[in-house]
Image (cartoon, rainbow, N blue to C red):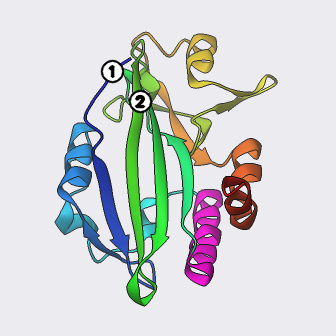
Amino acid sequence: MVTQTAHVYRYRVDASDMIVAVDQWWIAFARENNTTDLDEDSVVGKSLWDFISDYPTQRLYQEIHRFVRMTGNPITVPFRCDSPTLRRYMQLTIRRLETQELGYESVLLRAVPSRRLAILDPTEERSAAFLTMCSFCKRSLVEPSGWLEIENIAIKLRLYRKQTVPEIRYTVCPDCEDQYSNPKKQTESSTR
């Protein structure tokens, strides 16, 4: 397991979900992940929804936003943000700030080295085929097997070796949908 200093990656959205600020650690994390086009100038002033490509994930975050703004209760969501060679287990907390702004804070809980996964490398050439992946847990839908861990789909689809890899289409798997679709339920269970 890789251990690091726990940096907090922060950004804020205004009452209409426009990105109003990103911190230096967020920018550094974007650069570290080969997304050099994501810098302060390219994201501040844009809608958060411009950066979440799939409707199911947008809808789930919009539901969380409504709950946090209405109640003032923060919501914490575990998620994976894997790189081609690391399984990264992270935690995101969304809290209400002044004037209905929301603060996002992500923390890397742990990183585990893994065999290189071409599917997660944004520089890889992509085929016309696609793979459906959960935005939160990174499990992927492989029929008829169902939702499999990324390491298992890599073996099944032979995505370790160099070849043209499929596009990734993000969604929310049924388990994550069930876990995060009712923020009130999540808040009640975390206070017990």
In magenta stretch: residue 58: yes
Q: Quadrant of residue 173?
A: top right
Q: Please indicate, yes or no, whether residue 37 appears anywhere in the rendered image.
A: no
Residue behind mark 2: 110
Three-letter code, disc 2: Arg
Q: Quadrant of residue 151?
A: top right
In which quadrant of the rendered image does the N terminus lie?
Answer: top left
Residue, far right: 144
Q: Cα distance, mark 1 to mark 2?
A: 7 Å
Residue 130 against residue 158 in the figure, above or below: below
Residue neighbourhood size for the residue with mark 2, other residues' Cα within 10 Å, grouped as few (<14), some (14–19), many (≥20): some
Residue shown at 48% from the left, 58% from the top:
93
Three-letter code, disc 1: Val
Residue 29 against residue 20 in the figure, above or below: above
* Segment tinted magenta in the rendering: 55-72
Circle 2: element type: strand
Q: Main secondary structure of the magenta part?
A: helix
Residue behind mark 1: 2
The image shows residue 91 at horizontal and vertical percentages of 48, 46
Compare residues 59 and 5 and report the one nearer the observer: 5
Residue shown at 41% from the left, 22% from the top:
118
Q: Is residue 64 left or right of residue 30?
A: right
Q: Is residue 144 left or right of residue 13?
A: right
Residue shown at 32% from the left, 64% from the top:
11
Which of pointers 1 and 2 lies earlier in the amino acid sequence?
A: 1
